[in-house]
Amino acid sequence: IKHYNFIYTRKLLTLERGNKSVIAINGQYPGPTIRVSQGEQLYINVTNLMSQDEMLSVHWHGIRQYGTPWSDGTSGVSNCPIYYGTNHTYIFTANMSGTFWYHPHQGSERAEGGYGFLIVEETTTLATYDAELLLVLSDIYHKSYGYLEEGLLQQGDDSLNNWPGNGMVIIANGASANVFLDVQSNKTYRIRILNAASLAYYNFAIASHNLTVIQAGSTPTQPLVLRSIDINVAERFDCLITTTNQPPLSYRIHIQSNFQGTVNSPSGVSNSIFLRYNFNNTISPSKPCNQTKAIYSQARQILPLTPSGIIPNITKEIVFNITEQFIDPVNGYGIGDNSAGYYRWTLNSLTFNLPSTPYLLSSYYGMLATSHYSPSSTPMNLQYNDVVQIVLQNRAKTNGECDQHPWHLHGYQFWVLGYGDGEYIPSIHAKTLNLDNPLLADTVTNFPSNFSMLRNAIPFVANVNNAYKACGWTVIRFVADNPGFWHFHCHVDWDIAAGMGLVFNVDSNMLWNNLSLSLPSNYEFCGIINANTPNQRIPKTSNSASSTSSSNTPSNNEEIPNKWL
């Protein structure tokens, strides 16, 4: 058992371009690294001392939380927020090895910090190396996340002009300049890289050094040698670098922001980070490569070290058409280009809003169907053991522009089966999916076709005639074997705030009936439920859902009709 005590506070960070209030943990920005062995149980006590108007919830990104869904740390889904001056202890087991991370999951707080590595050591040696390096990449904004979020969520056309865009500067390990990763000559290092940014998709390279990818998140990979590596928001890659046959100097690390803003512009590039040999500050004249490559090429080359086995046939396919629309402020449905509504991201013309009463709490009290969830906060029902295939169909916004989206599914890993440009056509593209050896991941990119050819392509010019046209697609598949409520969303802070996501209800009553679980004694109340609320849940004794159930078995859910299809 490992115990941690995390105190979240505010801290003033000094940057080249001014000071910025950030979220620190035990005085550190980024926060402390959690390092445990596979199978260890964690008790992490989190205290919120940030500011009186800030609530907090902490998500343990990539941890499946099987049997502990109340520790997922997703405000409005699995948990009530931690109010200022109070604390909450998250208890869960690190069942999988890999490079994970933790971060706030309350509004857009992550834009100002509160995150760090969560490393679960593998039981068998993945690679031979001499030491480790840790690198947390992020972006940061002049204005507060609350100010940016408020502007983004205004009614009418004004919200279109309030897109936060790129941060003011790229941050590496909590600093914007003079960051050194110290190494010794003639060694091999394992570098764990995390993209904790709010928005930016990064390309990472080290002058005169190759990167050998050995792990993606929690999945060991076939060794892949790259000159530079693409890493989207919330992704983690473990790479090996060697320090042989190089003069003992400081080598520039090139971090470039792709897809947002002007490609290759100085504002999207950081060259103030160095791989420093033997504490020698003399800078090598060699420059990092500005590698030109098709964006799909890396994604398709990263494959699991151990074959995935037989990928099960699908029992449920869901196509999500993803775009921005003006929506009806009452029910959350898209109403076309009408400035009387709100401009939001939509999935199948429905935007998402989190409820004040967490779904997990409502389910435990038998009040899921009576908690008055609006169409825009209604969960999508999945049956236990459904084999779910999701087609993420990226579509142009009203101005004809295509964006990229890093999608994350809580509580699960999924097989990444394929990517493509334009419209996903099953009769054509289903046969191209990788069913032989797909990567298992918890985060995946939905690429924009307008940028899919070359990194230094001509910058996209908006054309309203392209509104809602197909940009690109991504296909994933997973087995719905983890009962509970699980958030599925784009990991760009501003896209989450503007409604890009939904929640899956995977036979949640199995938690209470079949698995005989109960909410822990330290679970907080909020919304319409308090400590005096009578439990209205009626245990079901039918053979509805069990460990051997399938999509043909009657569901054990207290269901609300799906609104998302």
Image: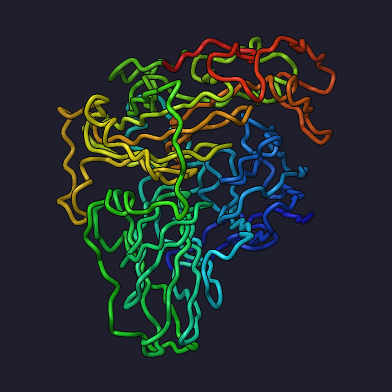
Q: Is residue 127 above or below residue 21?
A: below
Q: Residue at x 67, y 25 (%)?
A: 360
Q: Is residue 28 above or below residue 470?
A: below
- What is the x, y in percent for residue 233? 44, 49
Q: Is residue 269 above or below residue 366?
A: below
- What is the x, y in percent for residue 222? 41, 58
Q: Seen in the image, is 519 located left or right of residue 140?
A: right
- What is the x, y in percent for residue 456? 19, 56
Residue 344 lies in quadrant:
top left
Q: Seen in the image, is 236 located left or right of residue 259?
A: right
Q: Residue furthest front?
A: 310
Residue 142 visible, this angle:
no
Q: Residue at x 66, y 37 (%)?
A: 66
Q: Residue at x 77, y 28 (%)?
A: 517
Q: Seen in the image, is 339 located left or right of residue 388?
A: left
Give the position of the N terminus as an image quadrant.
Answer: bottom right
- What is the x, y in percent for residue 507? 62, 21
Q: Is residue 137 above or below residue 359?
A: below
